[in-house]
């Protein structure tokens, strides 16, 4: 009895540490209730003049002479996330130097962050009571409509009923015309592969089946080599053993294709998508389905990494090289890198797949940290398409297209095939230029030209969203001779419709595709069409299977050859080879035509050979010589303010306090020096390795937060940055 009293006293004398769902770099202490809440449960706490929702993240002694406020309510009976997933969030907060409360808020569905109770058991199935139907009378119109729906479709859950018919449920249940039954758990329905695996695929699958515990595999396969089939075969034994599999893709547009493949192989009832394009209620249902174990396969974007899988078995990161896996606002985490950390914490294997792996992943494979699985042959009999470079100097261009490329388009269409033209520029033209005085119309809030969109006759900034009408005359000299300079996807679409009026021209970019449903519809048109021309941006560059495309034209490749971003050449190589890989994936050979004003550039010669491994080795040697990642650890301290002198003063002040372990360069203006009215600059923070970088950042950032200049700027730390 005495021991129990001592334990109770220890608990009541301690404080609960709470991370509130806000971008605040400190946790807050509250009086510990009895019984003490578990780590990882939500609590409602008094905060300022109101209340906040937060997460219990620790316990500590109550500071002497301090009167702590009490927790208003403990929301959850048990932790929301497993210990491994909680550890992942705490690691992610520390590694990326971001407030823990906002990290938790990023990882949880927004409804839970607002205090919504945890979902209960799944809705029951509502079905008709045949005996009571015949004796029923005087039904309202909604009741009759609901009854008719259930008679036609069979049992349905409440969530599957039209919202307008749900109010009819209580009355029909009360009269015993409908009855509710517990829904049976969804069944896994594994189907055998419809494809015969080639030798390299079989070797990769065997290696993945033999994996036990944590291990990282880099599946390095050329475009069309059947990586997805390897993923599915690798997942099968985990699912048959009762475990769950998580597929991560970089963009929402890549979910439908992989989702369809998973549903056809494992059964639609156990497969679900999770991404930001869904409603809050949909995301919460999928979150709960993963947590309960009823959903066995999840296909999702970055945020799906934090789903609370009940029995995790395998993680697959498709297109692992894609920069979209790095969050660019708020918590600047890499979903790929944290997926590896999660696999380690869960003691499960992880597969990183790509036709053009990142240099970081390749270096880890070369050094033995990752198991390197290679697929050098395509799954079909077709070989990789040859690439021809078309010089553009002194050539007549029509909407940015050379005569040679247009002739090749005509020949391809006459043969009954499809053409894909890639141009990573949205809009009609990237700028408007005064032909008399040379003035370019810039965004008033950014250091970037306004893009001209002919439909709907607007000038738009693709950085801050500013829009304006066509001015009609030059703001400097009043000339009315304003000309569109350069070509965007909209201009290509207009010109090609005039040049080839007998075939459909399908444009796929962010201006005409605003949600996943639109993309699915456009892709369905591509697959059902005969001869056609696809025009698009990077939305078409990866992951899609177009068996009728035999010609790929890359309209303008030069913009990345001379960038100040040291990653630009790597991304250019990846983009070109990914786009090129859309050609010749069916039963007909493909070819790739690449237009350039600098055809003699050495990188283009390497690209023409089509060997990404040789390109990667060349780029890795450049990085090693320059001591850049992956051979050195890098972080950025970015700052922005409406007045540039405040940014400069802040960065100079904190640079002077940096520890000796950090090599500081800058301040430098950001590549986009002004954005949305804010002047932007950054410090480069380098160290010999990540351990040294983290140790130095941890102590230095405490001093950075105390700088008086920091109150007049917005600043953020970006660890392992991808954009500059």
Image: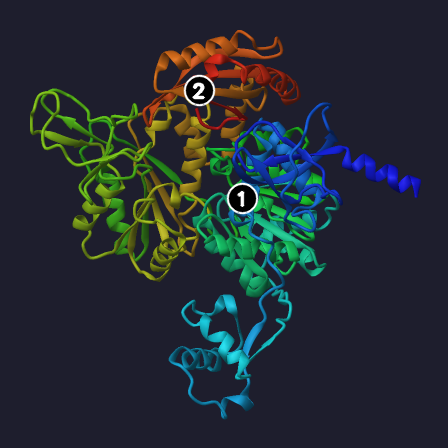
Q: Is residue 652 left or right of residue 85?
A: left
Colour treatment of the image: rainbow
Query: What number is the disc on residue 224?
Result: none
Instruction: Read off the residue under disc 2.
Output: 639
Does residue 381 appear in this view?
no
Quarter of the view holding residue 389: top left
Residue 458: give x, y in percent of width and height.
20, 39
Does residue 412 appear in this view?
yes
Mark 1 secondary-structure assignment: helix
Neighbour class for label 1 at 10 Å: few (<14), some, many (≥20)?
Answer: some
Q: CA distance from mark 1 to mark 2?
A: 26 Å
Instruction: Read off the residue under disc 1.
Output: 303
Asked whether 613 or 23 is in front, the reply is 23
Asked whether 173 or 342 is in front, the reply is 173
Mark 2 secondary-structure assignment: strand
Q: Is residue 723 left or right of residue 105?
A: left
- Above or below: residue 45 compared with residue 631: below
Residue 234: give x, y in percent of width and height.
64, 52
Q: Quarter of the image containing the C terminus?
A: top left
Residue 433: give x, y in percent of width and height.
16, 27
Q: Residue furthest left?
A: 479
Residue 528: give x, y in percent of width and height.
35, 62
Asked whether 607 or 400 is in front, the reply is 400
The earlier-in-sequence mark between 1 and 2 is 1
């Amino acid at each position: 009895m005495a021991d129990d009293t001592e334990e109770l006293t220890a608990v009541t004398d301690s404080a609960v540490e709470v991370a509130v769902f806000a971008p605040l770099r400190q946790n807050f202490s509250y009086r510990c209730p009895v019984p003490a809440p578990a780590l990882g449960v939500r609590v409602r706490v008094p905060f300022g003049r109101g209340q906040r929702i937060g997460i219990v993240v620790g316990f500590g002694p109550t500071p002497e002479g301090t009167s702590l406020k009490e927790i208003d309510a403990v929301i959850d009976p048990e932790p929301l996330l497993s210990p491994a997933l909680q550890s992942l969030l705490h690691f992610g907060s520390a590694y990326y130097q971001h407030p823990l409360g906002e990290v938790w808020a990023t990882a949880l569905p927004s409804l839970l962050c607002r205090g919504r109770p945890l979902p209960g058991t799944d809705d029951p199935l509502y079905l008709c009571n045949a005996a009571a139907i015949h004796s029923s009378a005087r039904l309202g119109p909604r009741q009759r409509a609901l009854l008719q729906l259930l008679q036609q479709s069979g049992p349905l859950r409440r969530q599957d009923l039209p919202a307008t018919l749900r109010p009819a449920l209580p009355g029909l249940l009360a009269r015993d015309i409908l009855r509710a039954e517990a829904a049976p758990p969804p069944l896994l329905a594994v189907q055998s592969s419809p494809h015969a695996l080639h030798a390299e695929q079989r070797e990769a699958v065997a290696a993945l089946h033999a994996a036990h515990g944590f291990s990282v595999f880099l599946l390095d396969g050329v475009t069309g080599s059947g990586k997805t089939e390897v993923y599915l075969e690798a997942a099968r034994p985990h699912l048959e053993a009762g475990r769950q599999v998580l597929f991560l893709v970089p963009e929402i547009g890549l979910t439908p294709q992989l989702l369809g493949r998973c549903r056809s192989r494992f059964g639609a009832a156990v497969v679900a998508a999770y991404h930001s394009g869904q409603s809050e209620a949909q995301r919460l249902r999928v979150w709960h389905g993963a947590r309960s174990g009823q959903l066995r396969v999840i296909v999702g974007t970055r945020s799906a990494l934090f789903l609370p899988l009940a029995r995790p078995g395998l993680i697959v990161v498709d297109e692992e090289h894609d920069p979209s896996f790095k969050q660019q606002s708020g918590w600047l985490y890499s979903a790929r890198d944290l997926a590896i950390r999660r696999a380690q914490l869960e003691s499960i294997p992880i597969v990183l797949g790509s036709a053009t792996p990142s240099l970081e992943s390749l270096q880890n494979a070369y050094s033995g940290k990752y198991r390197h699985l290679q697929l050098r042959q395509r799954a079909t009999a077709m070989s990789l398409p040859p690439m021809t470079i078309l010089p553009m100097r002194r050539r007549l261009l029509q909407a940015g297209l050379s005569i040679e490329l247009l002739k090749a388009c005509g020949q391809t269409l006459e043969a009954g095939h499809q053409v894909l033209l890639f141009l990573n520029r949205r809009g009609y033209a990237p700028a408007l230029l005064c032909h008399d005085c040379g003035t370019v119309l810039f965004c008033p809030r950014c250091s970037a030209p306004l893009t001209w969109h002919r439909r709907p006759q607007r000038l738009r900034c693709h950085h801050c969203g500013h829009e304006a009408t066509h001015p009609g005359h030059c703001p400097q000299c009043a000339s009315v001779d304003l000309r569109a300079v350069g070509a965007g996807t909209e201009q290509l679409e207009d010109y090609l419709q005039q040049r080839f009026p007998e075939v459909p021209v399908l444009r796929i970019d962010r201006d005409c595709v605003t949600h996943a449903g639109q993309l699915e519809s456009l892709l369905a048109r591509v697959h059902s069409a005969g001869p056609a021309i696809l025009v698009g941006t990077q939305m078409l560059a990866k992951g899609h299977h177009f068996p009728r495309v035999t010609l790929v034209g890359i309209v303008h490749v030069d913009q990345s050859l001379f960038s100040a971003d040291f990653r630009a050449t790597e991304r250019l190589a990846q983009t070109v080879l990914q786009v090129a890989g859309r050609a010749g994936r069916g039963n007909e050979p493909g070819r790739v035509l690449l237009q350039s004003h600098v055809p003699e550039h050495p990188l283009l010669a390497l690209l023409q050979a089509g060997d990404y491994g040789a390109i990667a080795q060349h780029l890795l040697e450049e990085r090693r010589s320059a001591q850049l990642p992956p051979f050195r650890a890098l972080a950025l301290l970015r700052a922005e303010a409406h007045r540039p002198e405040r940014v400069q003063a802040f960065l100079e002040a904190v640079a002077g306090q940096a520890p000796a372990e950090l090599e500081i360069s800058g301040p430098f203006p950001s590549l986009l020096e002004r954005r949305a009215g804010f002047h932007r600059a950054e410090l480069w923070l380098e160290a010999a390795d990540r351990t040294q970088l983290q140790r130095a950042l941890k102590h230095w950032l405490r001093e950075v937060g105390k700088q008086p200049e920091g109150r007049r700027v917005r600043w953020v730390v970006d660890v392992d940055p991808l954009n500059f």
